[in-house]
Image: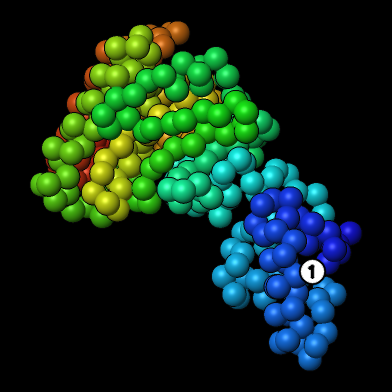
Amino acid sequence: MSVSVNEFWNRLVTNGIADAQRCRGWAAEYAAEHQGQPPVDAPALARQLVKQARLTPFQAEHLLRPAAPHPLRYGAWLLREGVAEAPFRGWFWADSSGPEGATAMLFPFAPPAAELEIDRRWLRSQQSIEAAGLQPIEVSEETGVVVSRLPAGERLTERLQTGEPLERSWLPRIVAAVGGGLAGLHAAGLCHGAVSAERVWLGRDGSVWLLRDASGPPSGPFRSRAGWFAPLSIPGRYAAPEFSLPGQLPDPLTDQYALGGLLWAARAGVTYVQQSSAQA
């Protein structure tokens, strides 16, 4: 069942993309470009609004769905597009209609935009931890979202896969960010449990962040849970020897062991496992 033009206009208003007056203006513009004919086809109207940069392709596709899985608007935040960069799952880039006009990553958790397991108590405990270099998160129970003001960028993994050593200027920033993030977690009696190049975010603005999955407690490198990040591609890459023991859980010491492997990899420009295998 397709969405009618009237329903499409209603969705623009209810999602806070445009008010009734602006919709009337857009309808008049459409008619002016179509021999005076008003829009009668929602997909055609959506295509024009995308062409005019009034909607993103993601927003247009979302509004045209007969049954949208989640809203586009969460309080002051309007979803712009899904976060395509690894390792994020169920995250979106969103723009704020507030006076600061900020852009951030947003994760809806009530209900989640993906089949994820959310531990609300763990999420709340993570919200209170602020440390230099630790991925910032703001939890809004009222709107059911997590906001993370991370810049656009990529994982350290993508840089290491080139096989070239990192520029020296990155290394002290990685040490400071990952070390500072872990110190904040450990001081709060928590651990990270997945320290890896896949959890280090290099912002295009030159910032470095330790990504954290605050959707639930870590289960260890060899046991995966459906969190808000994709599972590690090689789970045991930085695993401490203690994980050979049955029932071993992540703790600050295993985080520190993984940090050593991560920093070695960043310095050498290769993954820890690849280099160890080559020297064996």
Query: Mark 1: few, some, or many residues within 10 Å (few <14, many ≥20)?
Result: some
Image-based side of 155 in relation to 137, left or right = left
Q: Residue furthest front?
A: 21
Up the image or down, 239 lies above or below 137; here it is above
Quadrant in the picture for the C terminus: top left
Q: Which residue is mark 1?
A: 42
Circle 1 SS class: helix
- In terms of depth relative to the viewer, which is nearer, 196 or 28? 28
At 60% from the left and 36% from the top, the residue drawn is 108
Whether residue 241 appears in this view of the structure is no
Colour scheme employed for the rendering of this structure? rainbow
Q: Quadrant of residue 44?
A: bottom right
At 71% from the left and 87% from the top, the residue drawn is 33
Q: Residue furthest bottom?
A: 35
Q: Residue furthest right?
A: 1
- Percent coordinates x, y for residue 153 in the rendering: 35, 51
Image-based side of 244 in relation to 223, left or right = left
At 83% from the left and 59% from the top, the residue drawn is 7
Whether residue 101 appears in this view of the structure is yes
Q: How many numbered circles are shown?
A: 1
- In terms of depth relative to the viewer, which is nearer, 110 or 193? 110
At 27% from the left and 51% from the top, the residue drawn is 205
Q: Quadrant of residue 255?
A: top left
Kindly identify the amino acid type of the residue bearing the numbered disc 1. Ala
Image-based side of 173 in relation to 66, left or right = left
Up the image or down, 108 lies above or below 225; here it is below
- Percent coordinates x, y for residue 39 in the rendering: 81, 76
- Percent coordinates x, y for residue 40 in the rendering: 85, 75
Quadrant in the picture for the N terminus: bottom right
Up the image or down, 49 lies above or below 74; here it is below
- In terms of depth relative to the viewer, which is nearer, 99 or 54? 99
